[in-house]
Image (cartoon, grey):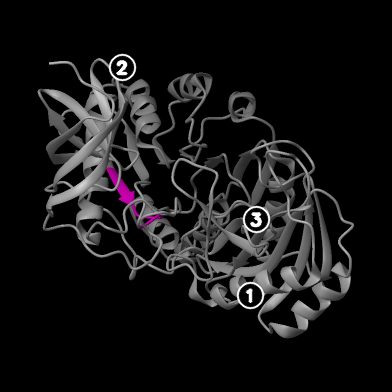
Amino acid sequence: MMWQQGQQVEIEITDLTDDGNGVGRYQDRVVFVPDAVPGDRLRVRLVRVKSKYAEGKIQDLVEASPDRVSPRCIVADKCGGCQWQHIDYEFQLQAKRDLVVKALERIGGFIQPPVEPVLAGESPLGYRNKVTYPLGRSATGQVQAGYFQKQSHRLVNLNQCPVQDQRLNPLLANIKQDIQNRGWSIYDEPQHRGKLRHLSLRIGQRTGEMLLTLIATQSSLPGLQEQAETWLEQYPSLKGVCLNLNADQTNAIFGQETRCLAGQPYLKEEFGGLQFLLRPDTFFQINTEVAEALLQIILQDLNLQGTERIVDAYCGIGTFTLPLAQDLLQKQAASKQSLQLHPVIGLEVQEMAIEQARQNAILNQIDTVEFKLGTVQKLLPQLGYKPDLVLLDPPRKGCDRTVLETLLDLQPQRLIYISCKPATLARDLKVLCETGVYELIRVQPADFFPQTSHVECAAFLSRSSQG
């Protein structure tokens, strides 16, 4: 029987894809359905039909899965910020572990991969320490801020968001109104006209300090300086108001230039017992609590003795580099021996991140670190020695193949690979383990992004005795 676009079929959802959609079958062919939960029986309309699969849209919920729950957000069915608010949180955690296991089996070729239960925080809500909202106007001319509707560029207006740190909610609603009152021009993306593009809010979850940043095509916003100073006086926790300039026709949110309008261009946050300075566009893990818990698991697993040579590849602002260096210092002090302490080396291609990493080292009075600017594939072979441990935390695309080949040549005793995409993690682990040089000891998933299908992992590898 031929499939037809617009056809309605009844299916049962049996699984979830790694991008969060439900999976069912009709006449032995796969149907992908957004907003579905395994265990749902649905009537869906086929909106896109291919020879081997189709994409469907829910028309009726014939029988709800026992793991289907009511979303905490009134616009969860429209907003593209979350995919899984309709799924019970315990089931979300199990589903994320399953995604990691399947990727390691299917892509990595691992048999019964050693994947731990997913590390989770105290609450699956209120975890985001940074939010960046596109701005727009309603049909009646009201300033809006929110996320784009799923698979569209239609803005879903928000006055609060259950997954962002709740201390940011008053700013979201009030600042929209202040922008309205100022009459500032709002950017129109299709026409590439207008000025204000995004509103970005950031909070140090441990310190409570906040930053407010406007992203605009140009700085000529009437009364901008006065408004920035008013915001600083109005919100005691607000430490700085910034303007980022981005006039390019691009999907990138932040441009190259950021100006501080009032206060200071950074906030202070505490992480792993250390202080970090975070600027508007600084990359920092979005979920402070779970990132800190994962750091503690890494430190416990390593059980550093104080003499190890450590390299932190893709080190960013030193989020993991500095706690590792601090742990080495403490272990050396506890040993009460005259041990040779080697500097922890951080490698990073972004010049701004390296500058901030060095500032954070000075802030914490840690002088046993060295940050090098450049690509990991270029810098790693130039170390001049074999490290005992390499920590990898690459972007979603994973490691460049030459990085993996350098590691197989250097053969550090231990590797820790932190990844935000199970597919690229599995691909790279296969390269590291398939020749027998390394053995995958365990994988610790961590839920940095509750209510979404994203899952972070830390994979622990040790040099094999057969390698």
Look at discs 1 and 3 and give the one toward the viewer.
3
Q: In which quarter of the image is residue 414?
A: top left
Sequence-wise, the earlier of marks 1 and 3 is 3
Alpha carbon separation for disc pair 2 and 3: 53 Å
Residue bearing the label numbered 2: 435
Across and down, in percent, residue 232 comes to: 76, 79
Residue bearing the label numbered 3: 136
Residue bearing the label numbered 1: 209
Q: In which quarter of the image is the N terminus?
A: top left
Q: Quadrant of residue 138?
A: bottom right
Labels 2 & 3 near each other (Cβ < 8 A): no
Alpha carbon separation for disc pair 1 and 3: 27 Å
Across and down, in percent, residue 456 comes to: 38, 47
Across and down, in percent, residue 122 comes to: 33, 70
- Of residues 174 and 109, the one nearer the viewer is 174
The answer to whether residue 465 is visible is: no
Labels 1 & 3 near each other (Cβ < 8 A): no
Q: In which quarter of the image is the C terminus?
A: top left
Give the SS element for disc 2: loop
Sequence-wise, the earlier of marks 2 and 1 is 1
- Of residues 142 and 208, the one nearer the viewer is 142
Look at discs 2 and 3 and give the one toward the viewer.
3
